[in-house]
Image (tube, rainbow, N blue to C red):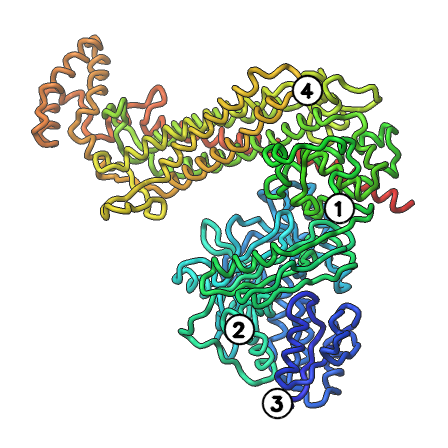
Amino acid sequence: MRNRGSFLFVESNTTGTGELLMKRARVLGFEPYLVTRNPTRYPFLKDSVAQVIEAETRSPGELTGVAVKVKSLAGIYSSSDYFVEAAASAATAMGLPAANPEAIATCRNKWKQAAELQRQSITIPETRLAASVRDVENILAQATLPVVVKPVSGSGSSGVRLCDSAGAAIKAFESARGALLDQVGLCNPDVLIQQYVEGKEYSAEIIAYDGTLHCLGILAKHKGPPPCFVEVGHDFPAPLPERSLQELAAFAVSAVSALGLEFGPAHVEFMIAESGPVIIEVNPRLAGGMIPVMLSHALGTSILDMVIKLYAGEGFTPPRAGARARAGAIRFQLAHKSGKLKRLGFSRDREPTVPDASVLKSEGEEVQINGDFRDRVAYAIGVADELNAAAAAAEGMIDSLEIDIETGGGESDNKQQAGSSDARWTLHPEAMKLLAPPIQITRDGRLLQYQAAIDEAHLVMLADQVLVSPAAAADLLKHILDLQDEGFQSLEGRDAPRGLYLAYEAELAARAGPEKAGWLHLARSRNDLNATISLLALREAACSTSQEIGILQDALLQRTEEASKLVAPLYSQYQIALPGSPGHYLLGVFFALGRERQRLHCLLEDIRNCPMGAGAGGGTSMRIDPLKTANLLGFELPSFNSLDAVASRDHHLQALSIFAGVSILLSRVAQDLQVWTTREFALIDVPKNLAGGSSMLPQKKNPFLLEHIKGSASTVVGAYVSAATATCKAPFSNSIEASNYGCSPLGVAEDALKRAITLTSLIVKFMSFNVRSMRENLEDGSPMTAVAAERMASRGVPFRQAHTLVGEIAERLSQDAGVAERRSELASHLADVLPASPEEGRDALQFGGGPAKRSTDDQISLAKTLFREMQLKCEEIRERWAGAEVHRKRRVKEFVDDVCIR
């Protein structure tokens, strides 16, 4: 092969395609050079993949000086996010192909990137910049949790955390500022706080050349458990309709174009939210995580070769249009805990559908859980004609990985529950399978967060009471903070034969040593722990449900002002009774919801006593301060009676009762709305994207979301009955029936209710009123006869007599006659008392909360006041908890910092 000259690589990514790019450059006939500040960062250099030049790679001037000395230099490129700008500046100075350094600088600073995308009307999450803890607190006072905290110039998910509390956000902010120091020696003084976007995440792989942006494909992304955002897999093509893929490619291209990137690769990450696609970030470089390798196998052409040739000035030829690409998938295995790798390897050979699989760490190497790309220990790529087969091939290969990590305490993966005082109890395998499945962070993560919060409060209290030494408390607190930062990933897949807590305690014992970890359980029991965790979970469920109800109330109010100007039948037992308005109906729902929401707030105010300190049900002989523990967890007081603390679950039953009340109300509303969508009523219409078709009947439009709302009520009511039944025969002490079966239905009920609330909100927001049909049902005058009878009574005719007279007149009306004839007949007998129009009939009903305009205006004014008060109440409760969390985290930090200083 002919010699094409030299190719200069500026630094490299350490686990992705950096090494492969240098190898491909050599295969293509280039002499690869790697310029780096620290050659020891790259173990692959021992294989002589490139000639090494040591220089200050953060200085474009010094890089240019290096480039001038390289003979026959054809191109300059960096596969590392942190050095693409310097590489582009050096290439530009040398007259070599490169992207605009200013555009890259804008992309690399994600705050500037967000501002530019927003300026050009590209949808992004709400984004704020924080440079201090005070900034974080001010931002959170206006934001809706959860939020995402991430460094302004990070990469590979380093320092990126999902935070559902103020304390977590402050901790993540402090961590993000130093996230890049140990990787590339960069300080991150500024940190972004973004609104979390619910939805599925995707990426677009784009190459810009000669004024055109070419999208190589849309990939679906798989992520590890929160609060981290470690990517654990990618699927190509994303399993979406072809038209959607084209629209998403255009959306991603518009973001790249808006940032002025006109040359080279770009990796665009975005979410598909309920409202549409939302850009998360645009990276001005080739995708990491082995995506280019997988794409190369799927497309049948080397993406790495394309990029090398592009930067060597040899142009770019996109994959041939119309060529049938195969499907591809990548899967990664993450380390589940920190320690030394004793064993790491695949137990089977690769099959033809797995063109590439490799380990990313070496046996004997120390691994540390970081909550980013560095947690990956192996990958496998699957390629097949169908995506399902490609994914199965990659997953099957990863499943064959054998991994054994030994912790600092000498515990290996095949040892269970070291350090637990209950280690002598071994549950029968069949019983364990049924009652104690392996830990799943997606299922158990929130409970572990509550456990860690309680541990923080308990240790601070013990140390303040001089029951535990400050040094022991600080050491344990540091390990608890580490577990939280890691998202408890070291517990993923861990057997828990004696419950989640003892598995968690065993992990702490492995890290801190059994002697220190043993102090953690002083003056407490799993009984008061479980009771406290259940109350923390309950108050979060109740408060978040209140917030969801608030969203529905807001939707109701938004539609009410418009809808109160219309006229519509008011029904009694499905019979037209009076003239009303859809706004009057929506207000009725608003006030009914408001009472349920106020009941939730009363419940939250009533959850004021913290069970911690009650122990197994008889308190403790230790001189503890349960009030301090309670305050650090956001409770007002400790429990007055230790037995009541561990035995009672009345708050859960009350919450489930309120949940049931809300779900029953929404079910009744859904029943009305479903009837009103029928041709016989035809009062409202539901848009196509909130309805479905029939598999057999081409003309049929199914408002099936309303049936889901009604069906959800059965789940919620059933959860209440289940919890009540489980509790009613339990003894008044700690018992599994009450603490487990009496509390576990709460999660099922919460999910079902929130689903019903969200679906109802969507229907209320987007349904349309059939104004003509509403009016036609009132125009024969019969719904206004009650008003006529009351007007006669106001003129001295006894109401019962007026009622009988008007009833006889209405009864004589011929149903075969037209609307105008029936109206005329009524008017001939009741001309001086019958309202002249539906509006007059409606507006006559102004007393007793009727639908008249004056009455409705008063109701709207009152509803807005009540809504503001309920919103403020919900925020006040949240702020009280957040304040307690900030105080607790501050105390924890004081302990840890004080010991470090000593």
Q: Looking at the image, tell me whether mark 4 or mark 3 is earlier in sequence order.
A: 3
Residue located beneath label 3 in the image = 1
| Disc 1 element | helix
Callout in the foreground (1, 2): 1
User: Disc 4 or disc 3, which is closer to the eye?
Assistant: 3
Left or right: 783 with respect to 635? left
Label 4, on which residue? Answer: 645
Q: Which residue is mark 1?
A: 482
Going from N to C along the chain, the mark reached first, 1 or 4, is 1
- Which mark is nearer the camera, 3 or 1? 3
Mark 3 near mark 2, Cβ–Cβ under 8 Å?
A: no
Kind of residue indicated by mark 4: Ala
Does residue 798 appear left or right of residue 750 in this picture?
left
Q: Residue furthest right?
A: 902
* Distance Cα–Cα, label 1 vs label 4: 31 Å
Residue type indicated by callout 3: Met
Percent position of residue 117, x then y = 54, 62
Q: CA distance from mark 1 to mark 2?
A: 39 Å
For marks 3 and 1 on the same chain, the one whose residue lies earlier in the sequence: 3
Q: Amino acid at mark 1?
A: Asp
Mark 2 neighbour density, 10 Å: few (under 14) some (14–19) many (20 or more): many
Q: Earlier in the sequence, mark 1 or mark 2?
A: 2
Cα separation, mark 2 vs mark 4, equals 62 Å
Q: Which residue was labeled with disc 2?
A: 207
Residue 726 rendering spot, x and y as whole percentages: 55, 21
Mark 3 and mark 2: span between their CA atoms? 27 Å
Q: In the picture shown, does residue 556 fall above or below 200? A: above
Q: Which element type, helix, strand or loop, lies under badge 2? A: strand
Q: Could you tell me residue 723's position as x and y percent?
A: 53, 23
Front one among 756 and 636: 756
Query: Is mark 1 in CB contact (under 8 Å) with mark 4?
Result: no
